[in-house]
Image: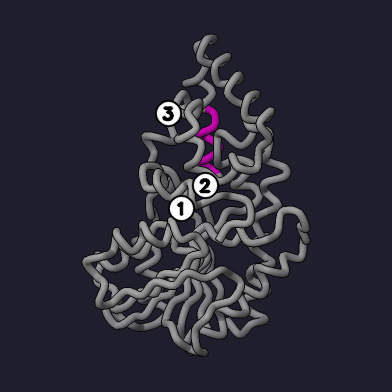
Amino acid sequence: MSSFTNYEDVSNSYDVYRRAGNMDLLIGMTTQLTGKPLKEMSVLDAGCGTGNYAQSLLDAGLGRITMMDGSDGMLTTARMKTANYKSIAEYRLARLPQLPFPDESFDVVMFNQVLHHLEDTSKFDSRYPIVRETLAEATRVLKKGGVIVIDTSTHNQVKHGFWFYPVLGITEVYKHRFPPVPMLREVLKNNGCSTVQSYVQTERVLMDYSMYSDIEGSLQPTWRRADSGFSQATPEQIQWFCQKIINMKNENTLKAFFDECEQERLTFGQTTTIFALK
């Protein structure tokens, strides 16, 4: 599904580091906005990855899930992870922006940390045409009274919410992969969504926190595979990043550095979750 990260490679280690961390908000808002209990909902998880969100929803009592991803490796892991729910789960290998489903098929369509992977890195367009087409497709396959969920990061969150992006030196380039939230609101409303709300959970961290806070761990390639931002860096930037971590370790300043970064993260957060009612 990604235009710049090889998720066939990442799929084997992804679940070691990443979690579905906003499930209370996701379940609470979708049930409130749709007016349906979870057991009566049909959800499309577009860009499902290894199925973390899908599994959490199924464990909570979801009625039916369709998991779609462009990576066969990620989808295979999702299939194995949700094997106990095969009677109410469907798996589809397909790439956004197309959603190969009939009109008004789902109560909820969700994109969890997906949209910044869509635009072609070699032909970047600040109008985000593939994102716009993806959201038009999402609205088409969404039932009337259904909800689109987008979990993303703002430019300020990319800049202030992750300790490693500034050290890596990719912040200014990488943040523009994330469509601005005002633009997403506009596109959703233009496609027929009547209500668009957004929430920031400043305490939430996308990675497992024990891994996120292990700065020395970032010297290992397996650690760096947990965040797609590293795939935007050149080999020279990776080498420079590792040297800076080693220097801070030798200077005994890692903890002070991390504590300072945490103050910023707890101010801005790492993610913004958008709920749009059709």
Magenta-colored span: 260-267
Q: Earlier in the sequence, mark 3 or mark 2?
A: 3
Q: CA distance from mark 3 to mark 1?
A: 22 Å
From this viewpoint, which residue is outermost toward the top? 251
Residue 269 disc label: 2
Q: CA distance from mark 2 to mark 1?
A: 6 Å
Q: How is the image coloured?
A: one colour
Which quarter of the picture shows residue 78? bottom left
Residue 29 in sight in this render: yes
Q: Nearer the viewer, mark 3 or mark 1?
A: 3
Vertical placement of 251 versus 8: above or below? above
- Kindly state the secondary structure of the residue where label 2 is placed: loop
Q: What amino acid is at disc 3?
A: Asp
Q: What amino acid is at disc 2?
A: Gly
Which residue carries the number 3 mark? 214
Q: What amino acid is at disc 1?
A: Gln
